[in-house]
Amino acid sequence: MAIGGLTNGTTYTVSVKACNTNGCTPTSDVPSTTADPFGDPSAPAVSGSVSGTTINWSWAAPSNDGGRSISGYNVFLDGTQVASGTQTTYSGSYGYSASHTLSVEAVNSAGAVSSEASSTETTVSAPPVTTAPISETTGSVAHTWTDYADAGGTEGPSIASNQTVQITCKLTGLAVADGNTWWYKIASSPWSNAYYVSADAFYNNGETSGSLSGTPFVDPNVPSC
């Protein structure tokens, strides 16, 4: 005989009488049976936090233990089991911009297992690579602008012929008369990374005087912006 509607973790005592149309016998002299039903626990609450390239996860016992005390947890990282025990934390160090999912199952003392609860976290992005500005020398007067896309915006101070300035990085913009599309961001004051200049006005090969004819369009040693 099955008895439904019981509450997990609650103890019930079952006694038996035999009955017919004439009435019922006294309760059986056989010792009564005690039942303490159980079921699956609910999922634990999982949370994570990021510190640089380290992810720290933690979880709390489920609100419903299924009628038996929680005896441990099964822990999975990206679908692979990495731990099983009573711990309630898990940490790992990973690369930059790495996403990982930790899933946890609760297990009670009757061996019943909850559904998984998960937390996905992503580590921080890599810091920008910084390089020292590179010296470049003009072979003619060079005009500077805040907008390299069309040599427009606000015009800045010109760079004199054969003047050496510090260049932060290179990028492509408006093509000048000979088809050169490379522009430099100028690190030196007074331009201070707010103005750009066509790379066509520079020797781009370490020279500091002479004709610009036949010199490279851009210095490959200058990093891209």
Image (cartoon, rainbow, N blue to C red):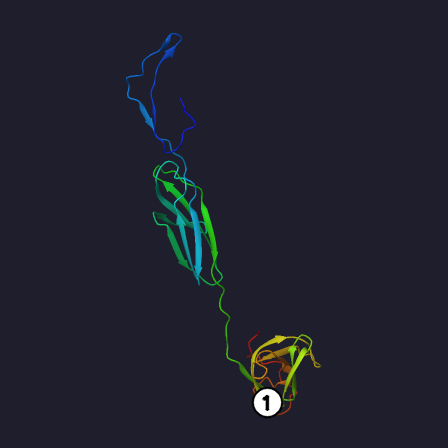
Q: Is residue 196 left or right of residue 84?
A: right
Identify the residue shown where x is 66% and y is 79%. Answer: 154
Q: Is residue 132 left or right of residue 21?
A: right
- Residue 145 at x, y percent in the picture: 65, 80
Quadrant of the snapshot with the N terminus: top left
Q: Secondary structure at mark 1?
A: loop
Quadrant of the snapshot with the C terminus: bottom right
Task: Residue under label 1, please give it.
Answer: 163
Query: Dot 1: within a 10 Å radius of its alpha carbon, few (fewer than 14), some, or many (20 or more) residues?
Result: some
The image quadrant that residue 18 belongs to is top left
The amino acid type found where label 1 is placed reads Gln
Q: Is residue 222 left or right of residue 141?
A: left
The image quadrant that residue 3 belongs to is top left
Q: Nearer the viewer, residue 118 or 82?
A: 118
Q: Nearer the viewer, residue 160 or 136?
A: 160
For residue 103, say whether it is visible: no
Determine whether 30 is above or below 11 in the image: above
